[in-house]
Image (cartoon, rainbow, N blue to C red):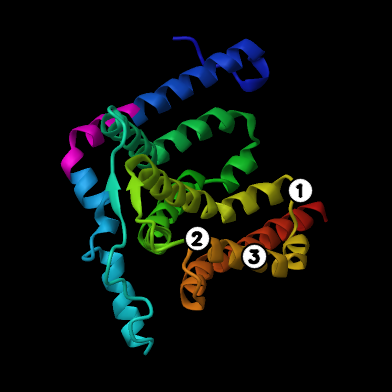
Amino acid sequence: MAARKSPDEMSFLEHLEALRWHIIRSLVAIIAVGIVVFVAKDFVFDEIIFAPKRLDFLSYQALCWLSNNLNLKDALCINEIHFSVVNLDMAGQFLTHIKVSFILGLVVAFPYVFWEFWRFIQPALYEDEVRHARGLVWVCSLLFLVGVLFGYYVITPFSVNFLGAYRVSEEVVSTINLGSYINVIAMISLAAGIIFELPVAAYLLSKIGLLTPEFMRQYRKHAFIVTLVLSAIITPPDLTSQIIISIPIVILYEISIRISARVNRKYQERMR
């Protein structure tokens, strides 16, 4: 078997061919997991997708417990689901089943997909860069999955119930289309997964000199304001829920500042 060429020896078309196989293997992993999800339809929809529509959902119980222990009475308790979900298209349920299977396939297979991406770019890095990035795949995967869980268990309950209960008039009854309901849950969960990659993004941008801790500290207040605005958009209009959503994002931002400072400090030490 011929030895694998180094990146400097590979032509542009050979790079494209290598990338194609990384993408193909990633898609195979996503489809394989998606098939398992597709087969496990009852569990996936009853215990995951429609769990936020039931009052016994773990997050609702936890929020009510937190509300009582903070002496907020029933401020965070959700005692009624104010909407129902319907399907309006002939093929709507089948297409939704496929879409949910693909999305969950992507989420579960994310560590492998990112590993394939890492294998593609790793040969182009210097040895010290590879050494400093050791464990990157696991860190990225862990942050993404934690972010998805945070979006699903924390942000989704607030958003789904606020949007479902919102009324412009008592004459309007909320009967939510299945596709719209799925889109809200998927968008929130995946967006949270991406936001939780902030420390990794800070590390990589600092390594290539596009981000500095001074810049992040200078715009810290702006970042906090943006965080509060986003929290106000996706949560009910009360301060407690906005704080619950904002705290992890603020913590991630502060961690990112320290990561950027550490990268910057090591770079200056090497330049001396």
> Residue 229: within the magenta?
no
How packed is label 2: few (under 14 Cα within 10 Å), some, or many (20 or more)? some
Residue placed under numbered mark 2 in the picture: 234
Q: Which mark is residue 258?
A: 3
Specify the label residue 90 is tagged with. none
Q: Inspect the image, locate mark 2, and give the three-letter code of the amino acid beneath it.
A: Ile
What amino acid type is highlighted by mark number 3?
A: Arg
Residue drawn 64% across the image and 65% down it: 258
The disc labelled 1 sits on which kind of residue?
Gly
Prevalent SS, magenta region: helix
Residues in magenta, as a range: 31-42
Residue 198 position within the rendered picture, expressed as x and y whole percent measured from the top left = 58, 54
Numbered disc 3: secondary structure: helix
Of residues 41 and 171, which is closer to you in this image?
A: 171
Extreme residue toward the right, this view:
272
Give the left or right position of residue 39, taking residue 106 as reference.
Answer: left
